[in-house]
Image (spheres, rainbow, N blue to C red):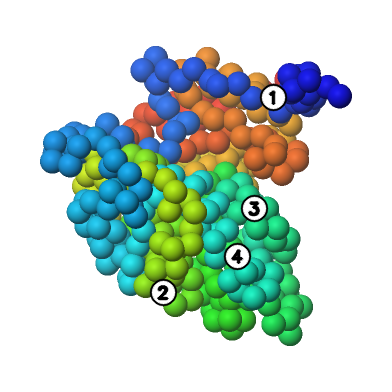
Amino acid sequence: MPTFESAFLAIQAGLEQSGHWRILPTHEPATCYADFSHNDYLGFAQDAELVEASHASAQRYGMGATGSRLLSGNLPPHLALENLIAQSKGTQAALTFQSGYQANATVLAALLDKKVLGTTPLVFSDRLNHASLHHACQLMGVREIRYQHNNLTHLRSLLEKYSNDPSPKFIVTETVFGMDGDMIDMPAFAALADTFDAFLYLDEAHATGIIGPDGYGLSSGWINQRGLAMGTFSKALGVSGAYIACSQVVYNYLVNRCQGFIYTTALSPAIVGAVHAAWSRLPTLTDMRTRLLGKAHYLRQHLHALGFNTGTSNTHIIPLIVGHTTLAFHLQAWLQQHRLLTSIIRPPTVPPHTARVRIALSATHQDAHIDALIAALTTWRAP
């Protein structure tokens, strides 16, 4: 029987040979001209108002929540933030979590519990959903029925195929896809959920702050009794953590059955203070969001003229899909030589043969930054 370390080394060797071995990169944005690698879409991570709000909340309530929400950690800042989120999203309730991955993996798992539902549910899942959503299904032993990416026709055909099955049905999707930069047709998904009596689970991680009414996401006004929305504070809001916006019934159920909520320390009051300040400002940033999406459209036009494949992107996230992982590394290195930072996304995060350099635009990017990126890409030649 192999030792643990020899087994791990065998995995490493295989990943290195296939080009899928990962190492932690050294991120030094101060040395670059423009950083297109982060998810700080509104530039809030360094915002002075958020820092001050965090400081004020920590001064009053401390740095740590001291326990889980069901023990000592249910503090006034948590309740105030959750009430604000529910009001903004048009839901009866909201609940905060330590991270988006934790929320997706444990909330969806709690909803899929066959002991509660009486039978194993049917989960119709976009094939390009975030790993945390797939993980939830694996945790509960639920086989996903995966539909073609963002393809409503295919999803409808699968729902019709199983329409006579009495098992509870769930539709699970991101609203803005973090690796592809495209968005769903929210009214159409809501209509399908109504038609087939399905629970709609929406991941708004990359929509929150940027897309939808007042930047509160595509799901605002479309959920409550028909499902829930998950979103994060770690991208456009510039902080960390996540939320669930839902009906009061679902809220009460999760407080009692979601292990990722029950058995973890509540968000730090310092974080909650900063998130509250960021969330409150979103309705005032319509012009900023409009300019950001305009810059994305401008960049895509130039990328298409240069022959780059940006997939179905129509938001602030733009992939340069080059296919092979080695080619993606080459392109990233070329851009880094021009002091432009980007991210490499490769299988298994994305499907085989779709390795890409991911460009994430931020409100902090100036026209000169985008033009510098276009200029560098104009001179790149695949090896």
User: Would you name the residue on which mark 2 appears?
Assistant: 249
**Residue type for callout 3:** Leu
Of mark 2 and mark 3, the one earlier in the sequence is 3
Of mark 4 and mark 3, the one earlier in the sequence is 4
User: Would you name the residue on which mark 3 appears?
Assistant: 139
Image spot of residue 139 (x, y percent): 64, 53
C-alpha distance separating marks 4 and 1? 33 Å
C-alpha distance separating marks 1 and 3? 25 Å
**Residue type for callout 1:** Trp
Image spot of residue 198 (x, y percent): 58, 76
Pointers 1 and 3 in contact (CB under 8 A)?
A: no
C-alpha distance separating marks 2 and 1? 44 Å
Rendered residue at 26%/45% (across/down):
272
Of mark 2 and mark 4, the one earlier in the sequence is 4
Q: Determine whether the residue tagged by mark 4 lies in a helix, strand or loop.
A: loop
Of mark 1 and mark 3, the one earlier in the sequence is 1
User: Would you name the residue on which mark 4 appears?
Assistant: 112
Image spot of residue 348 (x, y percent): 70, 39
C-alpha distance separating marks 2 and 4? 15 Å
**Residue type for callout 2:** Val
Q: Determine whether the residue tagged by mark 3 lies in a helix, strand or loop.
A: helix
Rendered residue at 32%/51% (across/down):
71
Q: Quadrant of residue 90?
A: bottom left
Q: Nearer the viewer, residue 1 or 128?
A: 1
State the quadrant of the N terminus. Answer: top right
Q: 287 above or below 355?
A: below
Rendered residue at 22%/44% (across/down):
273
Q: Nearer the viewer, residue 145 or 106?
A: 106
User: Would you name the residue on which mark 1 appears?
Assistant: 21
Q: Is the residue marked by circle 4 packed among few (<14), some (14-19), or many (20+) residues within 10 Å? A: many
